[in-house]
Structures are given as structure tokens and as C-alpha cells.
Image (cartoon, helix red, strand yellow):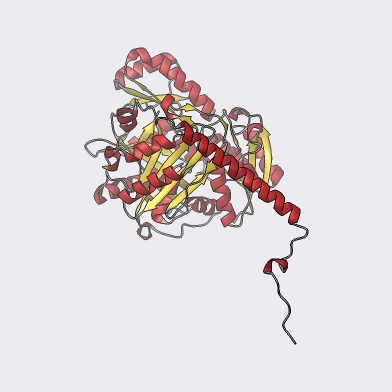
Amino acid sequence: MFKKILISNRGEIAVRIIKACQELGIRTVAVYSEADRKSLHVQLADEAVLIGPAPAIESYLNMENIIRAAHQSSAEAIHPGYGFLAENPEFARLCEREKIVFIGPNSRALELVGDKVRSRQTMEKAGIPIIPGMKRIPKEISEFDEEAQKIGYPLMIKASAGGGGKGMRIVWEEAELRSSVEAGMREAKSAFGDESVYLEKYIEEPRHVEFQVLADNYGNIVHLFERECSIQRRHQKIVEETPSLALNPELRHKMGETAKKVIQISGYNNAGTVEFLLDKDKKFYFLEVNARLQVEHPVTELVTGIDIVHQQIRIAAGEKLRFSQEDITQKGHSLECRIYAEDPAKKFLPSSGKIIFLKEPRGPGVRHDCGVYSGWEVPIYYDPILAKLIVWAETREMACQRMINALNDYVILGIKTTIDFLKDVISHPQFRAGKTTTAFIERYFSEWEGRKSDENLTLALLAAAFTSLETQTSRDRFMSAKKESFSPWKSLGSWRIGGK
């Protein structure tokens, strides 16, 4: 097992990985940009190394600086988390050359599945159902026009080198194509350091269902069942759950075995996710492989009892999987809500600024994967995800109610967040009935304006927050002043040693 791991990421996922390493007795190294000096992951790690200025291209996407930080700190392995360099085969190769273990798939598999176009070609040859679309990356913008005519509108523009909704655009007619391709290329370049995009047929109102897969270095492959990720805005997931109400046992088995076949064909190792679109007729199509830890991995952990980050580290350290497919079962139902620093009433405009007060939800069956704290300044440079709220219950209806209760208990003051929006999504009758598709938000929440602000309530909450902080500060000062004179014997009151 490793003695020290560097986490080449930030925010809640860096915190999640640090905690997993602590549980395994592994020391951690955080890397940070100048904008993240006071971030929670920097405070929690055993060591921290500055890797560059605030822009991601100069810090979290700077391969040389990250490798230098790994050597400087004597880290044996690098965990990339998700986003940034997590699916970059060049970075994986660089780690291999530098004798640093990349906690993820090998560079050959990563190059194949990370290149969405090559991956589609490979799957089609193996008989895996795929969505009609391009099978190569055009060199000229004009080539997109020709391919679009062959595929037919509406179309989806997708980044070849990454996921998470970055670079995605729906194109409904020819007049929109060129500007949409150029915008998608700019966004892909900014997010992944690679501007390559491609076209595929846009399937209207499908369900987005993915299968979590683990593969060790000895040919053993298992899936950890599915996640339903249909609740999306701007092609980015905001609510995930498992199991999916759309699958029956037969379809679940068929899709799970297909996912394992995709991983086997790719020569893939470590954790990954095989994504499918499921149409109204229950036909599924291979979408892509997300060759990394997914944002939504906690829901799978809660229903299977398997810690996916632990498994990633164990596999990277050369261990075999300790369980077979027959050993894995689903129990209960789990939901996840992504908490973003965004204003849903203003088209999800990012909201930066200081978090004045944070109150975390707690209780049975409630998990909070968080990367922020009261007093922290949310920067403008990165993905605005702050935390993930995850619940588990015996049934889906109980899980929905538990999520609403947890969201009601969740307080973040100082910036705009998606908390109120998520309450309304989970409370919606169509969501409660399990009738979710990727068009759900657009259909039912396109005109969402938020709840009317209660100015008095907001002022009361702010006053309570400041009072709480001041009380804590006063208590700390008092305890500091009393520290030298404090005696546990004095705290017992009057006493004496027994005897005559």
C-alpha cells in the first residue's frame, strides 16, 4: 500500500479523497492555486504545495508543476479526482514515465475511452449499440456542415476529451451550427486543455442511466449497478439516484453485462462509469466511458456498502478485487443533490463571494461531502460546485422526504446557491412519481424564479450566524485565558482524600 498520495484536484472531491486516505493510513499532499490558499482541502492534507496562479490552465491543468510537486513531496501516487486532468492520457503517460502511480486507468485505455470518437468506433465494431454520429474529429470547421447533413438535426456537440457537460451544445438547425461548434471548442479547451469536439444525433427526452464499474489489474471486472442521472441543467447532472425506476431486473442485468463488456474491450482498469441513454422504448445506447471517479459515486456507495475511493487506491496499489459480481447487492434507495454556488433564478449564473455562515444538515441516513466552510471566499475561476448532499433510506419515497428535510436544514448565507431550487425539484409530483428525463428541468422549471425572499428571516439568520460566531470567539478567548490556571481537580468541587 502507498505511504503518500498527492491529490491533483480541489474542493469537495479533494476533501473526499483525503478522508479516504486517512482511513487507509496514507499521508496526503494537497496542491493548490493562489486562489485556493485558504481552501479546506489545503487545511486537511498533511502537506500542501502551491502549483501556480488562479487560472486552471496555469495550475490544476499544469502537468509539469503537479509532477514537480509529487517529486518534491515524495508522493508515490497521484489521485486526479474528477475534471481537470482526470481523463487526460498525456498526464497518465507522464506519471508512468516519472514512476508515479496514476490512480485511474492505464494510459492506453484512457486514450481510447477518453477519446469519445475512437471509443464509439471501437464499441460499434464490438456490437455495442451506439448513438448515430461522427466517427472522427474534423480538421476544419466546414467539415461539421457536411457531417451534420448526414446525421440530421437536432444534433449534440460534445467534447471529445472530457465530460461533465463542458463543451456540450444542442443544435436545432443549420444556422446555429458554426457558432455552437466554436463555443463548444472554446469551452472544451478551457476545461480539458483540448478543443476537440464532435457531433452525434440528439435523442430527445431520454433517461440518462450509467453503470459504475471496477476492474483490477488481473482481469476481474464487476459492476456496482446503475445510477439514474436524468435531472440535468445545461447538460450537467444536478440530482442522481439509485436504483433507477426505469429498469427491471432483466434490463438491469443486460445493461450491467454490456457495461462490463465495454470495459473489457477497452483494456480498462480501476474505477470507471459506462454511460447509456435509454429511450422511451427501453432501448439503450452506449454514450461514453467516464474514465474517472464520478461526482455521484456516493449514492452507489450507500446502496452497495462499497467504498469506491478505497477500491481505486487498492487497485492502483496492485491488489485484486476482494469480491465477485455475485457478492454485490443493492439495499435501499439513495439520492444525491449537488450544491452549486449559482443563482437558479438567473439561469444558474455563478455566484462568487464570501460564505458568511454554513450550517450542515445532519441526521440518520444523511451524508454531506463538502469542500467549503464559514468565512471561505468562493473563487470565480472554477466549477461552482460547493458540496454534495446525499441521503439513504429503505424506499425511494422515504429517501425523497429525507432529502427535503435535509435541504430544509441546510443553510448557506452570503452567496446564492441551488438549495431552494433542489427542494422544488425533489418535491415535484413528476419527480416523486419517478417520471424523469433529461428534459425534466427544461419542461417544468424553465421559468423558475425562486421563492420570495423574507427579508426579516434573512436578517434573523444573519444575526444568529454572527451571534454564534461571536459566542464561539468569546468562548475561545475565555478558554485561552483560563488555560494555564485550569485544573481538573478544581472542577470537581469540594473534595478530600478519605481517612481519619
Quadrant of the rendering where the C terminus is positioned? bottom right
In the image, residue 496 above or below residue 24:
below
Task: From the viewer's side, name the closer residue of 405 and 293.
Answer: 405
Q: Which residue is most to the right?
A: 484
In the image, residue 131 above or below residue 44:
above
Specify whether residue 276 is in view. Answer: yes
- Left or right: where does residue 16 sit relative to residue 117? right
- Left or right: where does residue 367 sit relative to residue 283? right
Q: Position of residue 62 (x, y in %)?
A: 62, 32
Location of residue 152 (image quadrant):
top left
Q: Position of residue 119 (x, y in %)?
A: 41, 35
Task: From the viewer's side, name the closer residue of 166 and 352.
Answer: 352
Q: How many marks?
A: 0
Q: Which residue is most to the top?
A: 175
Q: Position of residue 488 (x, y in %)?
A: 71, 66
Q: Position of residue 155 (x, y in %)?
A: 33, 23
Specify whether residue 98 is in view. Answer: no
Question: Residue shown at 46%/38% (left/top)?
Answer: 339
Location of residue 94 (image quadrant):
top right
Q: Which residue is most to the bottom?
A: 500
Quadrant of the rendering where the N terminus is positioned? bottom right
Task: From the viewer's side, name the closer residue of 463 and 122.
Answer: 463
